[in-house]
Image: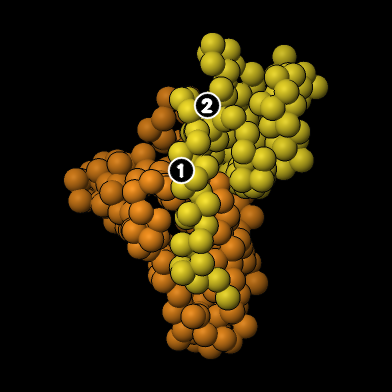
Amino acid sequence: MMQDFAMHILDLAHNSIRANAKTLDLRILEDPNNDRFEVELRDDGCGMDEDMLKKARDPFYTTRTTRKIGLGIPLFEGTATQCQGEFTLRSVVNQGTRISASMKYSHIDRPPLGDLGSTVAMILQANPKMRFRLDYTYEKQKFRLDSEEIQATLGDDVTIDEPEILLFIQDYVREHIKTLQQGGKSE
Amino acid sequence: MKSLADLQKLRDEAKKRVSMREGEASYRVLVGMATCGIAAGARPVLNAMVEACAANHYDCTVTQTGCIGMCTYEPIVEVIDKDGKKTTYIHVDAKKAVEILESHVKNGILLEAYSLR
């Protein structure tokens, strides 16, 4: 059981990393006015064929060899369906994978978004070379983050996974999202 | 509110430190970050380690790894020294994580109470 969506996202991001994705896009919508909550991850990794796609939703399937079950995708699907939401998983071999869930914001069983700042920092730590983009919307206000832009600011000598830089990004994301959730604007 | 312009100041400090580093770190610290690890609380463990490393500049690299195959013992942290000797710490939390860095990585003293026997 995952505590919140930030934990699901970190878990699913590891699938993209293992799929050798060069880019991972994370889109989140929190819209209490229209009672919508959406999470979508899209990568350009190795993708899955139809057979594997079917198996990916089966908890007794995993590509790893250290254990016999794989719960990342089934847990995410379970969270979506327990909130009467929609879950979609699409994938094309050599093109990438898109996984998304959409549900009612107000559903009583919906876990909170959780600490997205920490999750973003840990995704960047897991694979600093993968381009990671966040597109977060609260009602109509947007906050965006692009790891390539951050790396460009840092230059060639400092990588994004230096502990101080990761902590900065963590706080940066936390602050901006909190501001939007409280009705303010980013920047 | 923090902006990316603030990052430039941090960059210059980080640059100095990176240039002072010599050779490979003495320890490799691996945190299990598969579904089992995350569900058991590995993210706060990794978070605490990154924070402690930022504050104390331990002679180690902290990286994420997949499932080690002992899901009931998660969160798991493995500390590997330069000779390849591996110590597996189990049921780690944020507090234990900092103790492991301070004792094992900084002072070279294994914490047997937390390790897998």
Residue at the (42%, 47%) spot, across then down: A159
Q: How is the image coloured?
A: by chain
The amino acid beneath tag 2 is Ala
Q: Position of residue A1 (x, y in %)?
A: 62, 49
Question: Which chain is tinted yellow?
Answer: B
- Tell me the tag on residue B80: none
Q: Position of residue A156 (x, y in %)?
A: 34, 48
The amino acid beneath tag 1 is Ala
Residue A139 appears in view: yes
Q: CA distance from mark 1 to mark 2?
A: 18 Å
Q: Position of residue A55 (x, y in %)?
A: 35, 41
Q: Quadrant of residue A17?
A: top left
Q: Chain of mark 2?
A: B
* Vertical position of residue A152 compared to residue B40: above or below: below
Residue at the (46%, 47%) spot, across then down: B15
| Closer to us: B1 or B114 | B1
Residue with the mark numbered 1: A126
Colour chain A is painted in: orange
Q: Position of residue A48 (x, y in %)?
A: 26, 44
Mark 1 surroundings: few (<14), some (14-19) or many (≥20) residues within 10 A: many
| Closer to us: B90 or A81 | B90
Q: Is residue A46 rendered to the left or right of residue A150? A: left
Residue A76 appears in view: no
Q: Chain of mark 1?
A: A
Residue with the mark numbered 2: B25
Q: Is residue A33 rendered to the left or right of residue A102? A: right
Residue at the (41%, 66%) spot, across then down: A145
* Vertical position of residue B61 compared to residue A157: above or below: above
Q: Which structural element holds mark 1?
A: helix
* Vertical position of residue B83 compared to residue B91: above or below: above
